[in-house]
Structure formats: structure tokens, C-alpha cells
Image: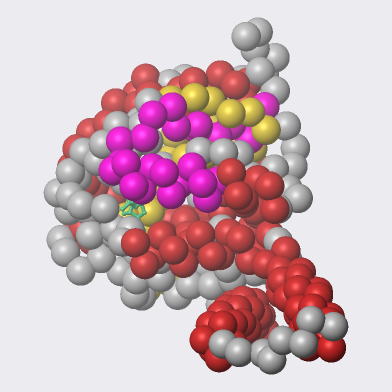
Amino acid sequence: MESSRKLSSLGVVIPCYNEEEGLPMLVEALKEFADGVECTVSFVLVDDGSRDASPQIMQSICQEDARFACLRLSRNFGHQIALSAGLAHVKGEAIAVLDADLQDPPAVVAKMIKEWEGGAEVVYGVRKNRKESLVLRGAFTIYYRLLKVITHIDIPTDAGDFCLMDRKVLDQLNAMPERNRFIRGLRGWVGFKQVGLPYERPARAAGTTKYNVFRLFNLAMDGLTSFSAIPLRLSTWVGLLCSSVGFCLMVWAVFSRLVLGNVVSGWASLAVMLLFFSGVQLIMLGVIGEYLSRMFEEVKQRPLFVVESKGGWLDRSDSAQS
Ligand code: UDP
Ligand code: MG
């Protein structure tokens, strides 16, 4: 691809939660990456309230290498919020987002820079092959396909948060006030020139995944509910369907009583229907509850995250300003 512009500075955000095993390896990889590219690179390591030695490791990295800064949140806020915190503090003409476990290889970022120089404004990594278990893989595939069908914006299939984006895209993201931050969705919502870059996603370099099934489910619900009202409308459709079936049954019951002379028997079918439809009603109430609870979160207008301390160049740039 021909290059029409040159990237001068790159900022990299890395959310970390209990990553002590992987951090030294990550830092080596990051340094090697930064030495290998032509632009200046700065890193923001976000410590999402880790309870292991991650903060100490980060601090020593910041002391020995001026390109690193760390941002410690006051508690564990979750991946998407930690990412938002980093994005609010990062500097650079373009910004990259990586996981701390080397599942998003820094070498791919170099390719993303090439795409940016070719005119792309968002370059997101598309996972070529997933290394997770078969069940999880199936669930991911179904979820991303479903998301694509029912949301009106283009949330790319099999793309995670791994990406490089232009400063103007980041400014838009940072200006979004919402608390339910499904970054890959918001990034798609913003628009601009988006390019997918296929890459092999390796298994975690060290440590264990910080997402359990419960957290993944919550993330999936955030994605669905913040970009689509269709689940809410589902209740209307299901309700209409139920009423029409009920109406037909009623006509049939009257007909069979008056014309065929049947006495209605069979309470079992009645009981089954009662149970089934009260189940449907409860599910639909649950759907409304999902939206309501998210609105409740939004109206409280609390800050997204609380910063406990800053280290490295973030600390220095603060004291330079004041
Ligand atoms: N992470 C975080 N806060 C959390 C959970 C995870 O900052 O509450 C970070 C984690 O350290 C990692 C990234 O988010 O850098 C992705 O997490 P993980 O690798 O566990 O997720 P997976 O790749 O298994 O989906
Ligand atoms: Mg990971």
C-alpha cells in the first residue's frame, strides 16, 4: 500500500488486571516494538485495581523507561472501563489498544500503522482462528452474527478491542458520556474509514483469563442492549403471536363445543400453557429490566472511573501543567 502520510507519534493503552506473571514478558515485547517502529511511542499501562504485584512491577517499569506511564484505578472497574480510563489519558496522533497477555501481538500494530498511513482511520484486528474451547468459540460466533443482524451499526464480526485509531476517532469516543462502554461497538458507531486486519490470535502468554462466563455474558448483554432496542420489541412480537394463537384456539373451542358437541377435557394442556406463557412474561419483564437497569446506571451520572495514582510520564506531565 502506498503511504500518503507518516505517523509521528503513537500512544498505546494496555489494561491490566492481576497480570504479574505476564507483565515482564509484555514489557520486553513492547520495548522491542517501540524500538522497531519509526514513530515515537508512549505507553499507558492501566492497573485495574490488581491485587497481585502488578502495580509494583509497573512502577519500576515507569522508573526505568520514560516511554511508560501507569494509571492506577482505585478498584477493579472491569476491562472496558479500564480501557476507557487509559483512552482518556493517552497521547499520540494515533492510538493503539492491546491486551496485557500478548494475545494481541505488538507486531500486528506495526501493520496497523501501515494501514493508517494508507488512509485508514480505524484499523481493527480480526481474529483468524480462535484458540478458545469449542463451546466458547461457538458462542462467540453466534453472538457476533446475532449482533450484526439486530443492531443497525456495523460491529465487525470476530473483532475485539485490539485496534489502532486516529486521534479524531478517539476524541469522539472520549466525548461519549455513556457508562455501558462496549468499546468495540462504540468504535463502530463512530464511523470514519474502518479497516479490518486479519491476524492469528495466540493463546495467553501467561496467567489465566480474567473473563469468566458470567463476565462474558454481561459484556454480551451490554453490547446488545446499548446498540439495539429489538429485544424490547421482542415482547410485542411474542405477545402478538400468543394472542393470535389464543384467538384461533378460542374460535376452535367454541366451534368444537357447539358444532361437534365436544366437552372440553384435559387440564394438562391448560397447565402447560399457563406455565409456558408465564415464563414468556417473566423473560420479557427481564428484558425490560435489563434496559431499565442500564438507564438507571446512566442517569446517576457517576464518573466512569476513579484514578488512585499516576506514574511515569503521566505523573510528570501533570506536575508540568500545575
Ligand atoms: N482486564 C482488566 N480488568 C478486568 C479484567 C480484565 O483490565 O477486570 C484486562 C486483562 O488484564 C487483559 C484484558 O483486560 O489485559 C483482557 O482480559 P483477558 O485476557 O483475561 O480476556 P480474554 O482475552 O480471555 O478475553
Ligand atoms: Mg486475553
63 over 42 or under it: above or below: below
Residue drawn at (16%, 64%), measured in percent from left and top? 52
Could you say which quadrant of the image residue 33 lies in? top left
Q: Is residue 9 left or right of residue 43?
A: right
Residue drawn at (70%, 23%), measured in percent from left and top? 119
Residue 150 % position (x, y): 70, 53
Comparing 231 with 199, the one in front is 231
Residue range (magenta): 120-144
129 over 91 or under it: above or below: above
Comparing 82 with 307, the one in front is 82
Residue 315 % position (x, y): 40, 60
Indicate yes or no whether the magenta region holds residue 140: yes
Could you say which quadrant of the image residue 204 lies in? top left
Residue 101 visible in the current orientation: yes
139 over 10 or under it: above or below: below
Q: Residue placed farthest to the top in the image? A: 2
Indicate yes or no whether the magenta region holds residue 33: no
**Quadrant occupied by the N terminus:** top right
Residue 164 % position (x, y): 54, 36
Comparing 117 with 153, the one in front is 153
Q: Is residue 68 left or right of residue 82?
A: left
Residue drawn at (67%, 33%), measured in percent from left and top? 194
Residue drawn at (41%, 44%), measured in percent from left and top? 138
